[in-house]
Amino acid sequence: MLGHEWAVNLLRSHIASGSVRHAYLFIGPDSVGKRTLALSFAQALNCEAPPSPGEYCGLCRACVTISEQQYPDLHVVEVGQLDEIVADDPVSNGVSVREEQTAGGVGEMHEVRHISSMVKVKQIRLLQRQLALSPFEGRWRVALLLRFWEASESAANALLKTLEEPAPQVVMLLTARSTESLLPTIVSRCEVIPLRALSQSELETGLISLGESAERARLLAGLAAGRPGFALQLKEDPEKMEQRKALLEDLFSLLEENRIERFNYAERFKRKRNESIQELRGRAIKTLEIWLSLWRDIMINALGAEASVQNEDRKTDIERIAASVHAEQVISTVQSTERTLSTLYQYANVQLAMENHLLDLPRITQD
Amino acid sequence: MKVSCLQENLARGLSIVARAVAPRSTLPVLGNVLLAAENGQLRLSATNLELGITCWIGAKIKEEGSTTVPARVFVDLVNTLPSDQVDMDLTVRTQTLNVRCGAFNNDIKCIDAQEFPPLPPSDLNEGLTLNVEDLREMIHQVTFAASTDDARPVLTGVLVDVDGGEMTLAAADGFRLSVRSAHLSTPSAGPIRAIVPARALSELARVISDGEETLTMSLPPNRGQVIFRAKNLEVVSQLIEGTFPDYEGIIPTSYTTRSVLSTGSFLKACRAADIFAREAAHSARLRISPGSELEPGTVEVSATAAETGSNESIVDGTIEGEAIEIAFNVRFLVEVLNVVNTPNVALETTGSTSPGVLRPVGSEGFLHVIMPMQLGR
């Protein structure tokens, strides 16, 4: 586990002293380690051979299957599972065919798999049935409700009774971005464990201990902005770095292009084959996040601030753009990027949002 | 693993354990059936982590071993095979099961048996001996009254209460309560009190074969499970955690009207009323009038629905006590009368707002409490 020492120590002491709470709520930004911490906690609760109280061995059947989320007494609830669980339910039939109007105006038939964007009451009911039973092989039945702000209000309300007094052998673990994103009645029934982003040096040391070179650790830690999960993804998946590189190149060339080219780019940004709306939205959000991180660095550079740069490897580009764009324009671009991101979170049309955003980008003319 | 058995035995065994397969679970191995060749028998097991069913069938074992086969594929395949000897041979390295029968030759991709959740070891000679016929009747008389609402998990189960030589099953859903007790031929060593999911008991009643006379019930300490073991069959269920409500307090101790009716006629009248009551929240009205010296007492069962129409049927019976009008959910009445197996049934009532009690006449041990509905009109 990278970082979050105080949280780890707290949970460890709860197990060691036998005062495990019935419900914990892990709060923190994406990729900061909420799920990892929750799974480690579940391992510590059910480990067959803990080296010391509150620890887990990581080798026994329980530890291995929990980390794979395949443990009989671990019940994971998150968005999208429902479609498989209730596939034989005629109302929410898994696959439906609907006509899709593409941007070119040609009607195409797409097979669209409906993946719901919410945790549904049905999932909660199923969970309640499972939690009522005594544990199958472990000491505890653990419910892991991921990204619980995505639960529908009725699903959250359906959970209240269970969350208030679950059966004695049940521990409920919830994760969310913030307490404000949940019903106050949910938050008040849990012990809240807030996780903060790690410091640059903390994350750097952690990455070096995992075998990264000092230079790369610094770059990854900067890019991840304190989110270990994000840093590990970049570390494990070279393709992610390639994608980032391509997206940054896109931005650099777009800055020099006229409106027509920018519209063409937004046009190309439409849905690929077999890509769901959610996946497309995710791709757009990822793109803007990478661009936002670069604009942040440009802003810091343009204003001559002291803060450390996230995109360590792009220093020359940052300096170049900071020199050719007016500082106020940089600030307004950062704001515009943030605004576009928030509209995307609120389910704006992806292509429209991208077009709108690209129009707002400053233009650098080559001299 | 190398094993041979008869197609019909295999098909029968699979049809029993397939009821516990969980095809869409997050654990892929739960969609499989465990095959284990050991001790001169072939063991078939399936579990959905709530209910587990194991069945042993006679087989010729050439090499011991085990694997798990995808249930849907295997069941469909075995059912199409001719009635002949089935030879199965597992290639451990690739986890491929070769199934050969007559002119048919098939290879099925399997999942390692190590991934299958461990099932509890059990001993035929341990636990409480129960008569299969009696147990099946008890289960039928009780499980239908259990709740299907998972928001109150305790009520989705059946309370199994064994104290000395007496065993009681009870289930309630907030509107009705079914209690059945019986004497045990062999008293239990210690008291037992556990809540077993109603679904598991229904499955047990369904899968237990007619050939068996007795089975044993045991609750291993600290496992949270109940194990029902017959000679070639084992049903394991997780118990429901929690405390069953104190039901004895809601059983009325007295009555002002007691109506003894023919079970069959009363059931027919209720069925007819239900056709009309469907549109009216299943509410049917009973007008109970005591007879005179010359005429028998009557119970008039009636239901009205604005769209469908109305119905009245009269059932003769022996009525003691005051005349009374009371409304019940007639579907509940139909369900309980279906499991009363004496020719006559007694309905005990105390006013139109107090619960009614149904008891079979001439047979002790069963009673059903049912809450009245608004009389309306």
Image: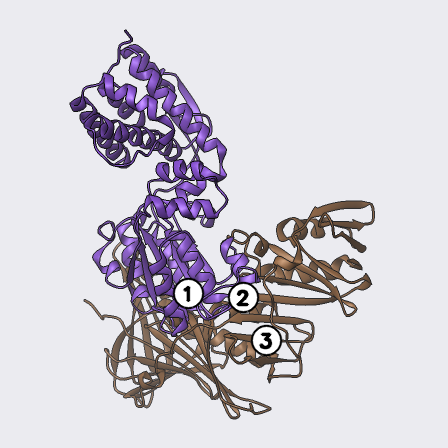
Chain colours: A purple, B brown
Q: In front: B225, or A37?
A: A37
Mark 2 crowdedness (10 Å alpha carbons): few <14, some 14-19, many ≥20: many
User: In which image quadrant can residue B251 be found?
Assistant: bottom left
The residue at which mark 2 appears reads as B51
Disc 3 to disc 1, C-alpha distance: 22 Å
Q: Is residue A235 above or below residue B226?
A: above
Q: What residue type is labelled 2?
A: Leu
* Residue B200 shows in the view: yes
The residue at which mark 1 appears reads as A131
Are the two marked residues, 2 and 1, in contact with CB atoms closer than 8 angstroms? no
Mark 3 crowdedness (10 Å alpha carbons): few <14, some 14-19, many ≥20: many
Q: Position of residue A345 (x, y in %)?
A: 28, 36
The quadrant the N terminus of chain B occupies is bottom right
Q: Which residue lies furthest to the top in this view?
A: A367
**How many numbered marks are there?**
3
Q: Position of residue B226 (x, y in %)?
A: 54, 75
Q: Residue B228 carries which label?
A: 3
Q: Is residue B104 above or below residue B319?
A: above
* Residue A77 shows in the view: no
Of badges 2 and 1, the one in the foreground is 1
Same chain check for tags 2 and 1: no
